[in-house]
Amino acid sequence: MKKIIISLVTITIIGGIVYILNTNKTKNDQETAIVSQKSATISVRAEKAQTKKIDANYKANGNFVPEQEVMVSAETPGRIMKILVEEGSRVKKGQTLAIVNADQINIQLQNAESAYATAKADAARFESAFTTGGVTQQQLDQIRLVLKNAEANLNSAKITANDANVKAPIDGIINKKHIEQGTFVGPGAPLFELVNVNKLKLRVNVDESHVANLTEGDNIKVKASVLPNDTFYGKISFIAPKADAALNFPVDLIIENNKNAKLRAGMYGSAYFQADQDTNTPILLVPRNAFVGSVSSNLIYVVQDEKAVGKKVVSGRNFGDFVEVLEGIQEGDLVITSGQINLVDNSPVSIIN
């Protein structure tokens, strides 16, 4: 009888343990399902698309570069006998910068001069002899040809000798000197870096919404960051016919330097383009980082019913951290600004602050 009671107690205990384990398993399975459901959503950040009045005047930045910049190179071999300029010297076009001792070239010039003098004297004798019948027409023609060739060789030798002295091809300033007196140079060796800063060029990138209203010859206000009290004006000299990958068009402005030549190549500058539209009209804006990849992709995700829905939009003007949207979404739409890399259309999302 005692054994039967012990067996019943044991069975009861075992049954209780099994019941508790089953109950815990069911509870754990339910909790796991809830966690799994939560982890299936993608965490994103989002902001509402808003209409705002904004200053639509456009500023584009770039660096000033010389309108003319030349590397003066040696045209003939020889040793630098004398340097006539230093770094910072202002020079005129055609001014001699350095003198090259080109002995071999000078000898060639002397030989060419002697050959020409001899040919000229021979031609004069043959002309005289021809009138008396002393030479034939064929002999006269041959000596005339010799004289013509001698003259051509002399002119070539003069040009080569003249090239031995290094001359400035443009007006400008010696920015860098690559030689010293006594240096032996060969053809093509760099001698001087010459820049003209009477005019400078500022290249900036202008987006497609503004470039359509620009024409070559327009005068644009220009400022240099290190000269806040000075205002310059640049004339548009070039508008690229093709945009880059970001839908920007390179535009060149030519700026007349002031009398003190305050502007220097390499300075940071900004061009200010006036708005072509009424700045009092509100426009629909979204954060720049709402676009997937880049603005040119025109793809934005908006949150609808806790899901990410891809929207193809038409982007307009670029205002730094914000971009105008012309079509595709409406004011108040919740656009996703972070986490798009993990999204596909209709991905479940949860918004975090």
Image: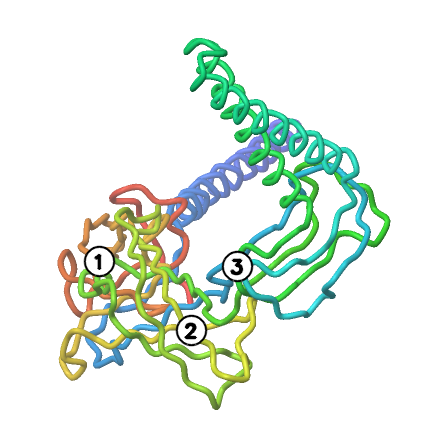
Number of the front mark, 1 or 2: 2
Q: How far apart are the alpha carbons under marks 1 and 2?
A: 24 Å
Q: Left or right: where does residue 146 sit relative to residue 252?
A: right
Residue 218 quadrant:
bottom left
Q: Left or right: where does residue 242 sit relative to residue 181?
A: left
Which residue is labeled 2 in the image? 270
Q: Left or right: where does residue 194 sit relative to residue 301?
A: right
Q: Is residue 243 above or below residue 17?
A: below
The residue under label 3 is which amino acid type?
Answer: Ile
For the residue pair 181 and 286, the one nearer the viewer reads as 181
Secondary structure beneath dot 3 equals loop
Task: State the quadrant of the N terminus.
Answer: top right
For the residue pair 324 and 170, the one nearer the viewer reads as 170
Residue that appears at 50% across and 18% down:
129
* Residue farthest to the bottom, as pictured: 229
Q: Is residue 313 above or below residue 21?
A: below
The residue under label 1 is which amino acid type?
Answer: Ser
Residue that appears at 54% across and 57% down:
69
Q: Which comes sooner in the sequence, label 3 or label 1?
A: 3
For the residue pair 228 and 64, the one nearer the viewer reads as 64
Question: Which label was assigned to residue 250?
Answer: none
Which residue is labeled 3 in the image? 170
Residue that appears at 54% across and 61% down:
93
* Residue farthest to the right, as pictured: 182
Which residue is labeled 1 in the image? 315
